[in-house]
Amino acid sequence: MLTITKRLGDGAHAATIKIELPFDLRTRSRQLTKLSTGEEVGLRLERGLVLRGGDHLITDDGRVVEIVAMDEVVSTVTCDDPWRLARASYHLGNRHVPVQIGAGWLRFRHDHVLDEMLRGQGFTVTVEEAPFEPEGGAYGGHGHSHGHG
């Protein structure tokens, strides 16, 4: 079976094959999945590595594969006031909710309870399908995580 054990560093890599995965699967270092060609591939990556949309991996036979962040059901919070948006981010973080931060918006996995909490605070919340790329956390930059000992 085809395997992938290595993420390529940043730079220009020509990928003709893709793997489309939701965020939860992009956090798993060991899994069986399929390439866009339909071929099965085993991922055996460094533990703690978080794959991001646009990352490039290399197969054991030398082909370059691009990771695609799959659309997921998410809630997107919008607000023109950055201070209010920071407050919404605080409330989500206080609940240990992974959050993606953009210019004038926040995104998290759809949760109707959190949606209602934020609407109750006057935020606009839209449920949609979009790629989900949450922040890596205080200890994680690109693809790193911290452990709890």
Image (cartoon, rainbow, N blue to C red):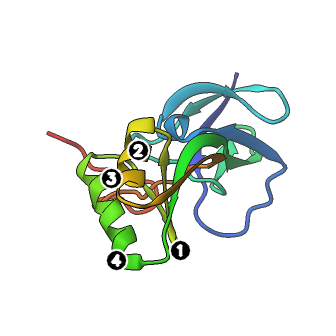
Is mark 1 in CB contact (under 8 Å) with mark 3?
no
The reply to whether dot 1 and dot 4 touch (C-beta < 8 Å) is no
Q: How far apart are marks 1 and 4 (CA)?
A: 12 Å
**Mark with earlier residue (4, 3):** 4
Q: Residues within 10 Å of mark 4 (few under 14, many from 20)?
A: few
Distance from the alpha carbon under mark 3 to that under mark 2: 12 Å
N-term-proximal mark, 1 vs 4? 4
According to the image, label 3 marks what residue? 92
**Disc 2: CA contacts within 10 A as few (<14), some (14-19) or many (>=20):** few
Q: In which quarter of the image is the N terminus?
A: top right
Label 1: which residue? 103
Q: Position of residue 115 (x, y in %)?
A: 44, 45
What residue sits right under mark 4 in the picture?
83
User: Which circle, 3 or 2, is nearer the viewer?
Assistant: 2
Instruction: Name the image quarter holding the C terminus.
Output: top left
As measured in the structure, the alpha-carbon distance from the residue carrying label 2 to the one carrying label 4 is: 20 Å
The label number, if any, that marks residue 64 in the structure image: none
Closer to the chain start, of discs 1 and 3, is: 3
- Rendered location of residue 129, percent (x, y): 66, 44
Q: Which of 115 and 1 is in front in this view?
A: 115
Between 55 and 3, the one lying in front of the other is 55
Type of amino acid at the residue the image marks with label 2: Glu
Residue 144 in view in this figure: no
Q: Which mark is residue 116?
A: 2
In the image, residue 119 lies at what x, y percent?
42, 53
The quadrant where residue 85 appears: bottom left
**Amino acid at circle 1:** Ala
Of helix, strand and loop, which one carries label 1? Answer: loop
